[in-house]
Image (cartoon, rainbow, N blue to C red):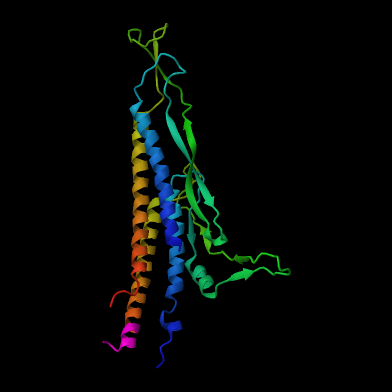
Amino acid sequence: MAISFEKAFGMHPEAMLVRERRAQILSENIANADTPGYKAKDLDFQQALANAQSRQAKPMARTHDKHFNISIEVRQEEKFRNPDQPDTGDGNSVDIHRERNAFLQNSLEYQASMSFLNSRISGLKKAITGGQ
Amino acid sequence: MSLYKVLDISGSGMTAQSVRMNTTASNIANANSVSSSIDQTYRGRHPVFAAELSQARRQQDESTTVKVLGIVESDAPLNVEYAPNHPLADENGYIYKPNINIMEEMANMISASRSYDTNVQTADAAKQMLMRTLQLGQGQ
């Protein structure tokens, strides 16, 4: 059986990238919990993971040497959250408890991916060194 | 790495909340500062927060930090009190007290301190995630 480094880690590297991005978005929500008019956002995980796996970056056509090499990242995965209660008066839709729990859950899921990768790496190490 | 940005974002939240704490402390400390004219009386101060979309070099690196737009003075009417025996009373016997509601300021203080705590916890969780990532594959 050949060891394939491509497949050894499965989808976990991409999943971790998406989790990182989600941690960023949730921390934005938490930091802006008192900002008037701020709307809470979240990541559509399924969509984000699919985008990360297919790496959907659409480069613009360059018809001249001096054109910039620009690529547009498709970001449909970022969505606004549906608030649980009507507007409290300042247009802010952050529910701090929900965001905190989502952040906690996200970091646990990140660590789950991490421990999977860790055990995978130690397994590969063992296979390479022959358990010595 | 998005996780480094979490630290920036939480940091901006902590800065904003500490400005709020600062104005609250100033309001509470001056709640009983009496003066003899309307112009000289202390007025309650409150910070104005705004979300700041900081566009970095690459398009995907946008993050929304908190910005303190400025500090505004409250427009609420001052508390005018008739106290002819007060040493600071004007010729009509009135003294002017700041337009600060201590209860409101206490609630503001608690809210600011809770929000500050939450931002600290977020930064701490991000730190742990980063540390674990740096140690990836080092165990046996």
In this view, the residue in front, A79 or A3, is: A3
Q: Which x, y percent locates residue B21? A: 37, 38
Identify whether B14 is placed above or below A4: above
Residue A95 seen by the camera: no
Q: Residue at the far front: name it.
A: A66
Asked whether, in this view, residue B43 is left or right of residue A55, the answer is: left
* Magenta region includes residue A126: yes
Is B61 placed left or right of A126 in the picture? right
User: Which quarter of the picture shows residue A109?
Assistant: bottom left
**Residue nearer the viewer, A63 or A85:** A63
Q: Would you say residue A9 is visible in this rendering?
A: yes
What residue range appears in magenta?
A124-132
Residue A125 falls within the magenta-colored stretch: yes
Q: Where residue B94 sits in the image (x, y, percent)? A: 40, 11
Q: Position of residue B62 (x, y in %)?
A: 53, 57
Looking at the image, is A49 positioned above or below residue B17? below
Which picture quadrant has residue B121? Answer: bottom left
Considering every residue shown, the one lying at the far bottom of the view is A1
Q: Is residue B32 above or below residue B12?
A: above
- Residue farthest to the left? A132
A83 relative to B132 in the view: left or right? right
